[in-house]
Every structure is written in C-alpha cells, then in structure tokens.
Image (cartoon, coloured by chain):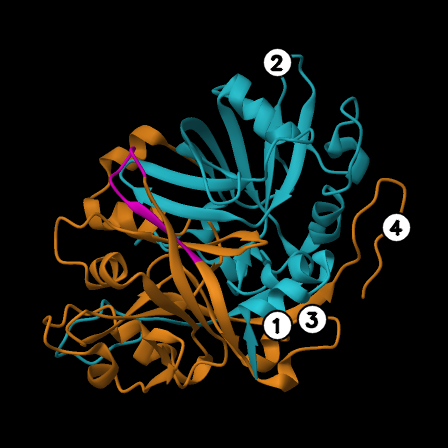
Chain colours: A orange, B cyan
C-alpha cells in the first residue's frame, strides 16, 4: 500500500507522531544521563542517536525544541557533559518509564529505580545497570532549521563495557550485552545475531567472519 | 573494563573505525537509492539514519566527506530526491555488497542483484525487494564542522509497505517485515519483538499494549 504526504497530513497529531517515528526502522535504545549545575541528576530515554565519526569518536543525539523544559538539553548546554547508556532487556521497562514528565526536583534515577554511577573524569551520571556506558563532552550544537530540533554532538571520552563482550579484533558482542532496540516511540525488540560479513569489494564474494 | 579517549587514539585506523562505529548500539540497515542527472542509478547501504521529526516527516542520513567520489551525496545535491529502503533478512548480503566501490558507470542494483522500481512522483529508484520503501525530497544539508560529514535531511513524500504489516492504530510490525539491524559496519542482527509499552506517566504503571 502507498501512503502519501497528503495522507500523513490528515492523520491525527499523535497517530502521525507514532507512525512517522517508526519509518527509520530499528533504533538504539539508550538512556542519556546528565546533571544540572545545581547537582540534580537527570535521566531520559533517547532513540534518536547517530554515529557521526570514528576519529575523533563523535556521536549525535537529537533533542526536541526547548520551548518546554528539557532537562537533558539544558544540562548539556550548561555542563557540556552527558552519558549514553545502552538499555538491556533486564531494565527496558524502567528505561521507558524515564520518559514520564517528572518535576525538576525529581531524579528519574530514583523514580524508575536505576542506579547512578560516576567516573572521576565525568560530571554526568552513568547507569550502573547498563552494560555499555559512554561519557561524552559537548563538541557542537547544530540547530535543525526545518523543525527547531537540535543535534547535540559529543566526543566520547570514556567507554565502559564487560571485557567478555569485546573480542580481540574489537567486535562488541551485543547479544551477550542483551541490549534492546526500539521502533517508533514504544515498541521494543531483542536482536539475535545473523552474521558478521567481510568488507565488500567489487569482484569478491562476501564471507561470514 | 574502561577504554579511554587516549586508548582510542592509539588504535589502528581501521580497528578504531570498526570499534567506534559499534558504540551507538543497534542501527537501521537501509539502502539509499538515487539517480544521477544522467540517468545512472545508484544504491548504497547506510546505517547512519535518524528520525528528525514527524510533522513534517523528516529523516536525516549522514554522508561522509565528498573528498572522494560519493555518488549518493552528489546525486542528492543535483536531483534533490532519494529513497530509503529497509533491508530484510532475505537480501542482507546483497545489501552489504552494495558498499563495494563500483565504478561510476556501474549500477549497484545490477551488480548486487536487486531490482529498481519507480513511483511516478519519485525520480530516485526504490528497491523492489524491500518491504518498507520511502521517497524523500531534500530539505536541508547540514555540514558537521567537527569532522566534515554532512547530515542530509529529507522530507518523506511517499511510503510503501505491505498492508498486512500495518495495524489499524498505525503500528508497523517489523517482525513481519523481517528487516535486520546492524551494529558497526558489518554485523547483522534479526530482532524479535519483546513488547509495546504504554505512554509513560509519573504515577502510572506501564502496560503492555
């Protein structure tokens, strides 16, 4: 079936948000940890996360317009530090619950039952339960003219993961990490490994590594 | 284990690219279809794809610097149209093969064995084998200062998917679509649905929808 731009326009606002959010396919599910200048910890689930580059190691996260209070964006603007914590199957419901609109004085860590943990070199809290945690410092804020969102680009300064999940050739075993993926705003999936494929060359058959 | 920024710097260039590309977790696997002004079709696998907004429906894809020939970026700059085609399990190896450096005169469709299909309102080719195809028109090109990449933002103008995969409340059944997700540059996973969760509110228990 075909759905046109005009048909998208005719959908109810919530239904359109639900539908369009699913069009990019599988997305990462991660918790962004920040801390305000006043010391209040903030945790928010994000799926709009994109690899920007490897050298330096850059990752972008998309924040909605700050017309309403957006703790994460404000904290990053002020402190220039945030963490990205992959969501595992064992706590995906708590992670989803972090999207609720708690008051500024409430920390989502406490409200949803997750544990903040610190690295001496990172002002923002990481999530102890997460099997893959990153600390980043702010590099660039890119306003998207088309809709008022902001792409926040950070540079990875430290990475935490279980040694058992990292092979000698630096492949991360995400099945062992047991992390989830999300489609749209609310549907969680657990991936199972199919294959790692060799580097593609014009006249060479792919191999399974 | 902890890996620091300094340790990342000390890795070999290829190993660093392989490792850092995995840090954002599960990514979509999609083929970007374009056609040059001269009529040559181009197909390239991308995983750096991000939902930007629902109204209008905006999606961003990240392109590497155009210091070398980048057919996709050039074609989008010239024609302002591209397609995003989700990769299913049935053709993920062909999709991966599209990353090989074919010459400008070669169409990846023919080289890897996938079929171009057209919508009268879309200049760029879609991939017939793909269960979820989008046509987009260029809205914004955002240069990333930190590393010379470009975030290409397009507006969705048409969507094709099987009617059986769309529920009345506009949820897309990705398990039925049988699409894959990728970590890093080369490792493919097949997700299985865990649960769709209700909208999170501060004093409400989450329900499975």
Q: Position of residue A186 (x, y in %)?
A: 34, 64
Quadrant housing residue A111 = bottom left
Q: Position of residue B147 (x, y in %)?
A: 52, 44
| Labels 4 and 3 touching (C-beta < 8 A) | no
Q: Which residue is mark 1?
A: A192
Circles 4 and 3 on the same chain:
yes
**Distance (Cα) linking label 1 and label 3:** 19 Å
Q: Residue B37 — which label?
A: 2
Disc 1 or disc 3, which is closer to the eye? 3
Q: Could you tell me which residue is drawn at 14 percent across and 75 percent down?
A: B202
Using a 10 Å C-alpha cutoff, classify the residue at mark 1 as few (fewer than 14 neighbours), some (14 to 19) or many (20 or more).
some
**Distance (Cα) linking label 1 and label 4:** 24 Å
Q: Residue B189 — which label?
A: none
Circles 3 and 2 on the same chain:
no
Q: Chain of mark 3?
A: A
**Distance (Cα) linking label 4 and label 3:** 23 Å
Q: Which residue is mark 3?
A: A170
| Magenta range | A144-154
Looking at the image, the residue that sits furthest to the top is B38
Quadrant housing residue A9 = top left
Q: Chain of mark 1?
A: A
Using a 10 Å C-alpha cutoff, classify the residue at mark 3 as few (fewer than 14 neighbours), some (14 to 19) or many (20 or more).
some
| Labels 1 and 2 touching (C-beta < 8 A) | no
| Tag 1 secondary structure | strand
| Tag 2 secondary structure | loop
């Amino acid at each position: 079936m075909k759905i046109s731009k005009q048909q998208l326009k005719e959908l109810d606002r919530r239904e359109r948000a639900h539908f369009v959010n699913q069009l990019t396919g599988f997305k990462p599910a991660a918790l962004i940890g920040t801390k305000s200048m006043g010391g209040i910890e903030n945790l928010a689930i994000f799926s709009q996360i994109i690899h920007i580059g490897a050298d330096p190691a850059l990752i972008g996260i998309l924040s909605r317009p700050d017309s309403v209070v957006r703790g994460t964006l404000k904290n990053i603007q002020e402190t220039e530090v945030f963490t990205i914590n992959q969501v595992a199957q064992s706590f995906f419901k708590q992670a989803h619950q972090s999207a609720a609109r708690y008051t500024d004085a409430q920390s989502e860590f406490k409200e949803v039952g997750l544990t903040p943990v610190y690295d001496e070199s990172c002002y923002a809290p990481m999530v102890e339960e997460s099997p893959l945690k990153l600390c980043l410092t702010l590099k660039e804020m890119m306003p998207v003219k088309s809709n008022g969102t902001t792409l926040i680009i950070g540079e990875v300064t430290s990475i935490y993961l279980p040694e058992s999940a990292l092979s000698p050739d630096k492949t991360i075993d995400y099945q062992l990490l047991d992390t989830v993926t999300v489609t749209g705003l609310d549907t969680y999936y657990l991936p199972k490994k199919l294959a790692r494929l060799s580097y593609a060359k014009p006249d060479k058959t792919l191999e399974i590594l």
